[in-house]
Image (cartoon, grey):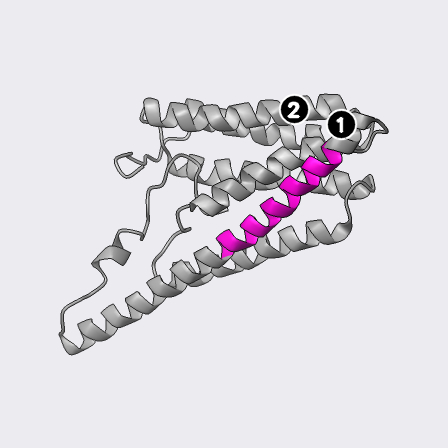
Amino acid sequence: MGGDVVSDRVWTVPNLLSMLRLLGVPLFLWLVLVPQADWWALLVLALAGLSDWLDGKIARAWNQTSRLGIILDPLADRLYIFAALLGLVVRGIVPWWLMAILVLRDVLILGALPILRHFGYGPLPVNFAGKAATLCLLYSFPLLFIAGYASVIADVARIIGWAFALWGTALYWWAGLLYAVQGLRLIAQTRRDERADHIGGPRAGEDSDSVRGHAPDQGRTGP
């Protein structure tokens, strides 16, 4: 949201919700792996999704968008994705290669952050493909857990869950490619501006300056 003011506040309602959501990650993983209490684990996942929606709404409505929230919110999403994948892989419900593909994409994105910082940019704002990918993946995991049981409902959940998982994985990588293209354009623009400054010519990078230290929606940076 372009009109939101990003503050340095720590103790805000959205940040507290994000912190609670982060605390739920080890609980979720323990429920999945130790007692294998899948229904309780799915309840934790559902509450995490509800708090994810609430903190964004509250941040905008109460003008509580913060730099900490911009970090915590996508971090919680990534950790829940990782925890759910780990649980599914350990339980033998999904193959290891699905987790490897998704983790590799995040490793590449994280590896690009120092390069962006070198040119004066923070994490890139989220795009629609990234939001859709995260939603698809988070929808797929409960269905895949249900698919681990023997029943007609489990068979239907398996089909729908894998559809969400594969579509979400494709969107996840497509969003990563869009971030890469945007990052390369910003870096190229910065270099052109530096050359223009060196020779005393006009700068052409006014648009790229707005991305530096951007202030995206609460907790919404590129996943």
Up-down: is 133 above or below 196? above
Q: Residue furthest bottom?
A: 199
Q: Amino acid at mark 1?
A: Leu
Up-down: is 203 above or below 131? below
Q: Position of residue 103 (x, y in %)?
A: 64, 52
Name the residue nearer the viewer: 133 or 154. Answer: 154
- Which is the main secondary structure of the residues drawn in magenta? helix
| Secondary structure found at label 1 | helix
Residue hosting label 2: 44
Left or right: 115 in relation to 197: right
- What is the crowding at mark 2: few (fewer than 14 residues within 10 Å), some, or many (at least 20)? some
Residue hosting label 1: 31
Q: Position of residue 194 (x, y in %)?
A: 25, 71
Q: From which residue to which does the magenta span run? A: 157-176
Confirm or deny contact between disc 2 and disc 1 (CB under 8 A).
Answer: yes
Name the residue nearer the viewer: 130 or 192. Answer: 130
Q: Position of residue 36 (x, y in %)?
A: 81, 28
Q: Is residue 82 visible?
A: no
Left or right: 183 in relation to 164: left
Is residue 158 part of the magenta span, yes or no? yes
Q: Amino acid at mark 2?
A: Val
- What is the crowding at mark 1: few (fewer than 14 residues within 10 Å), some, or many (at least 20)? some
Q: Quadrant of the N terminus?
A: top left
Q: Position of residue 135 (x, y in %)?
A: 55, 37
User: Could you say which quadrant of the image residue 161 lies in?
Assistant: top right
Name which residue lies at 63% across and 51% down: 102
The span from disc 2 to disc 1 (Cα, nearest Å) is 9 Å
Name which residue lies at 23% across and 62% down: 205
